[in-house]
Image: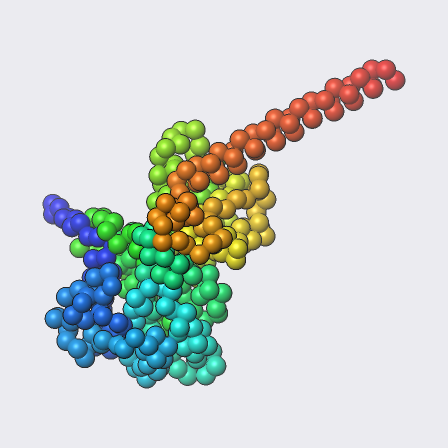
Amino acid sequence: MSVEIMSQMTFREAIRAAMDDALRCDDRVVLMGEDIGGYGGAFKVTEGLLERFGPSRIIETPISENSFAGVAVGAAMTGLRPVVEFMFMDFMALAMDQICNHAAKMRYMYAGQCTVPVVFRTPFGGGFGYGASHSQSLESWFAHTPGLKVVIPSTPIAARGLLAAAIEDDNPVIFLENKALYNLSQGMSPKWQQMKIGRARIVRPGSDVTVVSYGRTVWLAVDAARQLGTSVDMEIVDLQTIRPLDRDLLRESVGRTGRLLVVEDDCLSGGIGSEVIASVVERVALRSPAARVACAEVPLPCCQSLERAALPSVARVMDAIKGMVENNRELVDRDAKGRCERHTSTRSEVACS
């Protein structure tokens, strides 16, 4: 009997492997971005690919995000499959016209006569003291745009499987990589498989509360579950894709637990958590009010102690879960006491009549 040998692969290496596979298997795939060649990218994700595939496939761009995003959109419409790296997610603001007004709409505007198979990938999120213009989580900007798909993996296996799917997709895909995950390591099977965009996964089954998250914050939920132990039976759902959103799995999970907490690195106002909660409560009755743990409503500071205070943490996740469960128990006890008092009062009235 053969034994499958698992090799350890970091999140960074998994993304690089997915691009390497695509470049080898499909001559239409090209990479574009600032410093992605000799330097290997701001976070060394594309390191070594220039040597393997040459400058006609690994294309260094000027510091002009709107320009090279537009070149990629045009290239995708005319037969190539570009994978574009933005050095930081914050810089995608400079290319919003090309991404949201052109890439997202072309297939619809031309009634399917053209496709736009382009992937825009970028690191996002705080935790490194990079400051307000290099640390944002702007996923809700893109999730709001019809025509775009938005993918946010939390593990090396998901990063490789979902990026492979994104590169083969005929629609524009925003592929987001939380900086805090680049060194995360996981065993990778040589028989790894491409994953389907739009599918969430249950990381941990449970019965007391559903905790929904994506990217880095999935690991906050996992750590919170470990620390809470048997006191709260948490079900953890990793969205993996925030557009399209796997509403069926969300409703099924919350239908079992009756409670919902969303944890996200984005700001509270207008974040993905709002859409998750709305999608669930449209169909599912909750046992207690839904809750959210998100980034503070401030530009992230460079000072790392202040930055840590603004970002979601394991402690904040645990406090939110404890509050939901304890408050609900109080409501249950109060409701049970009220029913008992009403029953006693009715019996007394009957006895006196």
x 40%, y 73%: residue: 94
Q: Quadrant of the N terminus?
A: top left
x 12%, y 70%: residue: 52
In the image, 244: left or right of 65?
A: right
In percent of width and height, residue 119 lies at 33, 70
Q: Residue furthest right?
A: 353
In percent of width and height, residue 276 lies at 50, 53
- Residue 15 sits in quarter: bottom left
In the image, 45: left or right of 218?
A: left
> Image height check: is 335 above or below 35?
above
In the image, 17: left or right of 344?
A: left
Query: Does any portion of residue 247 appear in the rendered image?
Result: no
> Colour mode?
rainbow
x 59%, y 52%: residue: 282
| Closer to the camera in the image, 36 or 20 | 36
> Image height check: is 270 above or below 345?
below
Query: Does any portion of residue 85 appear in the rendered image?
Result: yes
- Residue 69 sits in quarter: bottom left
- Residue 60 sits in quarter: bottom left
In the image, 119: left or right of 30?
A: right
In percent of width and height, residue 17 lies at 20, 61
Q: Residue furthest top?
A: 352
Q: Quadrant of the C terminus?
A: top right
| Closer to the camera in the image, 177 or 205 | 177
In percent of width and height, residue 232 lies at 44, 32
x 43%, y 48%: residue: 310
| Closer to the camera in the image, 324 or 298 | 298
Marker count (numbered) = 0
